[in-house]
Image (tube, grey):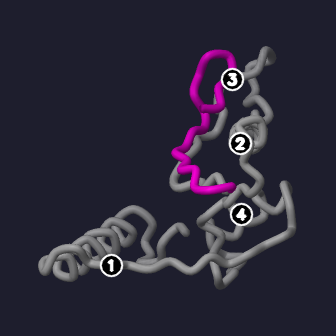
Amino acid sequence: MSRHEGRALAGGFFLALGDTTCYLYGGSIRDDRPGTDGQPRKDAKAPDAFYWNAMLDAKRSGYRVFDFWGIPRVLDESKHSYGVFKMKLKFSEDRAWFPAYDMPLNAAAPLVTRALRWRKTQNNLRKRGSADDVL
């Protein structure tokens, strides 16, 4: 977790495998508290602090590689994912693509996957006006 004055602003889940720490999922909110002059404060950059401290913790624990996960294969500057990508580039411009595979463990898995994909698309349409994923 990344906190500022006690308020959680960013956090995530990690998995360590071999010499690699993998970032699996996370999120953040803007630091919208008013400043001492009543005007909005400059954003506390909680995601930056969150990632930096996660990398330091992984290094202290003996991990050599930090996998940011979630960097889009196709970059589109009009998408939210492009901003996330640019933020992650602050830490390193070295990139390696790790393939991902799905292995259904149950005969119903493909049906459940399609139903969840449909639900996610509907949520994206309702909340963002677009069927595109954030990442």
Seen in the picture, residue 22 relative to 101 is either above or below; the reply is above
State yes or no: residue 58 in magenta: no
Write down the residue under mark 3: 4
Tell me where the magenta segment starts and ends, as one range.
1-19
Question: Looking at the image, can residue 43 be seen?
Answer: no
**Secondary element at image label 3:** strand
The amino acid on which the numbered mark 3 sits, given as a three-letter code, is: His
- Give whichever of 48, 24 is nearer the camera: 24
Instruction: Please tell me how crowded label 2 is: few (under 14), some (14-19), or many (20+) other residues with Cα within 10 Å.
Output: many
Write down the residue under mark 2: 58
Compare marks 4 and 3 and give the one earlier in the sequence.
3
Q: In which quarter of the image is residue 115?
A: bottom left
Q: Distance between the residues labelled 2 and 3?
A: 22 Å
Residue 39 position within the rendered picture, expressed as x and y whole percent measured from the top left: 76, 26
Compare marks 4 and 2 and give the one earlier in the sequence.
2
Q: How far apart are marks 4 and 3 (CA)?
A: 22 Å
Write down the residue under mark 1: 103
Compare marks 2 and 3 and give the one earlier in the sequence.
3
- Give whichever of 70, 19 is nearer the camera: 19
The amino acid on which the numbered mark 4 sits, given as a three-letter code, is: Gly
